Structure formats: C-alpha cells, structure tokens
Amino acid sequence: LQNSKEEALNAAFRGDQSQFKDSSLEELARAVITEVRHMPGNEVCCDCGAPDPTWLSTNLGILTCIECSGIHRELGVHYSRIQSLTLDMLSTSELLLAVSIGNTRFNDIMEAGLPSDSTKPVPNSDM
C-alpha cells in the first residue's frame, strides 16, 4: 500500500515516475518542502508563531518550531508525528497533508469554536 500511494503521489506531482532514481525523488521532496514552507501561514510556527519553523507534523499537516515539536513528540505519534524538514528524508506521501492543510487552514479549523478571548502561546511562553 505504501508503494502504491508513493507511486500515485509522484505521478500526480510530476507525471510518470517509472524512470526516476533516488536523487530525482529527493529533488521532488525538496521542491515540495519549498512549496510547503512558502504556503500562507507556514512562515511561522502553527502553535506559537515563532518564525521559520522547520519541523513538520506529518499526520496534522502543520509546521512547528523546535520547542513546539518537542511538545508534539511528548503527545505521542498517535496525536502528532514530528519530522524535521532539514534532517529527515521525507517522502512525498509524508508531505502531501502539509500541501493540503498548512498552518492557516489547520488553525482556522481547530480554533473556530474557541472563545474570542482565548490566547495562544508565544515563542517565549513557558511550556
């Protein structure tokens, strides 16, 4: 199933991938990461607003800073599976949700029912 999903995603992003080598897949992943980083709202951490987040929750589709990524890791992979955009080799299937969701859309959904006087953590909050 994983290979089928990977093949379908690669085909959707670039067409027929049957002749691609590992380096081409890495180039594709880097291109998708660049696209994800430039999506509206992804220039800051989804949770605290710290600039230039480099950690991805592959099952939530959001970018977080290193501090918030630690909190997500403490929650467990059944809530948030955290991977580094710079240190880990991410597949296109792991990046697909981030392309579809992103920080802005995620926060719009998750914060829709919060009272207007609710506050979010900031980069220097005690966590």
Image (cartoon, rainbow, N blue to C red):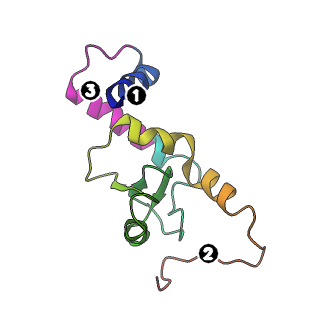
Asked if residue 31 is among those painted magenta in the image, a careful observer would answer yes
- Compared across the picture, whether 109 is left or right of 49 comes to right
Q: Residue at horizontal 25%, vertical 53%? A: 87
Predominant SS of the magenta segment: helix
Residue to which mark 1 is pinned? 5
The answer to which image quadrant residue 116 occupies is bottom right
Part of the protein shown in magenta:
16-34
**Amino acid on which disc 1 is placed:** Lys
Which corner quadrant of the image does residue 91 belong to?
A: top left
Q: Which mark is residue 120?
A: 2
Q: Amino acid at mark 3?
A: Ser
The residue positioned 39% from the left and 64% from the top of the image is 76
Mark whose residue sits in front, 3 or 1: 1
Q: Position of residue 85 (x, y in %)?
A: 34, 51
Q: Badge 2 local density, few (<14 within 10 Å), some, or many (20+)?
A: few
Give residue 50's position: percent from left, percent from top: 49, 69
Q: Secondary structure at mark 1?
A: helix
Horizontally, is 43 left or right of 113 in the view?
A: left
The label on residue 24 is: 3
Tag in front: 2 or 1 = 1
